[in-house]
Amino acid sequence: MKTTLVSLLLLLTLPLSASAQRLKETGKQVKDLVPEGWTTQEAWGDLYKNGRNDLVLMAVPNDPAGITKRDDGYELNENQPVLAIYYMSEEGDLIKHYEYDNVIPPLASLNYFTDVTLEVTNRGTLIIDLSTMYTAGSYTSPRHSYVFRRQNDDFYLIGEDISYYTRTTGEGEQVSINYLTSKKSSTKLKVFDEPIENGKTVWSKISRKPLRKLGSFTLEN
């Protein structure tokens, strides 16, 4: 019993592990919000339509349990990124409004690498763009771009662009979906041609469904 009590006290006095750390609730700058050692991607813009510069932040934890070392010694961070939205107060403080653990998939594995770009447009929409290069298991290089709009004090998916090309043939396809109008367009691509030759665009209707909320699903890479 004495040994167990000592062990418990030691655990309680140890620093929080990377997996237990969280983004801070408020701060003046990005560095105030992110635990040490996490890598970040950010976008700024007026999401709340109040004339202030809000922050969309993606942060990748550095938990050792999620870091894999390849045979050549290169380390892959397979920890799942955290996505957060901070609004700026009248005093200039960044205050966390939303935090999501399951929106963006891990950015690297033994089979792929994903680049993420965040953007806040002049209209206040949020664009999350994922471009993936597979090193094994697939000959395609897909790119997914998701468009979210704030309404009812939340963010909803209103549009999606998917494109890919096959590394062996150079052929591909681009699909655009508008969830507000329930329309979809599809265009075949020949990316190895000079100049690029786009095929005929085909339009179709999709079933109307409730808009999906940011945080209710994981984006595809």
Image (spheres, rainbow, N blue to C red):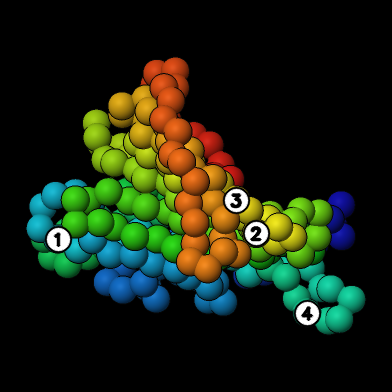
Q: CA distance from mark 4 to mark 1?
A: 41 Å
Q: Nearer the viewer, mark 1 or mark 2?
A: 2
Earlier sequence position, callout 4 versus callout 1: 1
Label 3, on which residue? 172
Nearer the observer: mark 1 or 3; the answer is 3
Q: Is residue 49 visible?
A: yes
The quarter of the picture where residue 44 lies is bottom left
Return the disc, 1 or 3, that comes first in the chain's sequence.
1
Question: Is 184 located above or below residue 114 in the figure?
Answer: above
Tag 2 residue: 170
> In the picture, residue 76 is in which quadrant?
bottom right
Q: Residue at x 10, y 58 (%)?
A: 51
Task: Inspect the image, locate mark 4, and give the three-letter code of the amino acid beneath it.
Answer: Tyr
Q: Which residue is mark 4?
A: 74
Please tell me whether mark 3 sits on a helix, a strand or a loop: strand
Circle 2 or circle 4, nearest the eye: 2
Q: Could you tell me if the residues under marks 3 and 2 are in contact, i.e. CB atoms within 8 Å?
A: yes
Between marks 1 and 3, how big is the CA–CA gap? 40 Å
Position of residue 84 measured from the top left corner of the image (x, y, whole percent):
41, 54
Residue bearing mark 1 = 52
Residue 31 in the image: x percent, y percent?
Answer: 39, 76
Q: Residue at x 45, y 33 (%)?
A: 202
Whether residue 12 is visible: no
Label 3 vs label 4, nearer the camera: 3
Query: Residue at image x 68%, y 68%?
Result: 77
Position in image of residue 9 (x %, y %): 71, 62
Three-letter amino acid code at disc 2? Gly
Q: Nearer the viewer, residue 36 or 175?
A: 175
Q: Nearer the viewer, residue 83 or 189?
A: 189
Query: Would you call the spot at circle 3 few (<14 residues within 10 Å), some (14-19), or many (20 or more)?
Result: many
Residue type, mark 1 in image: Arg
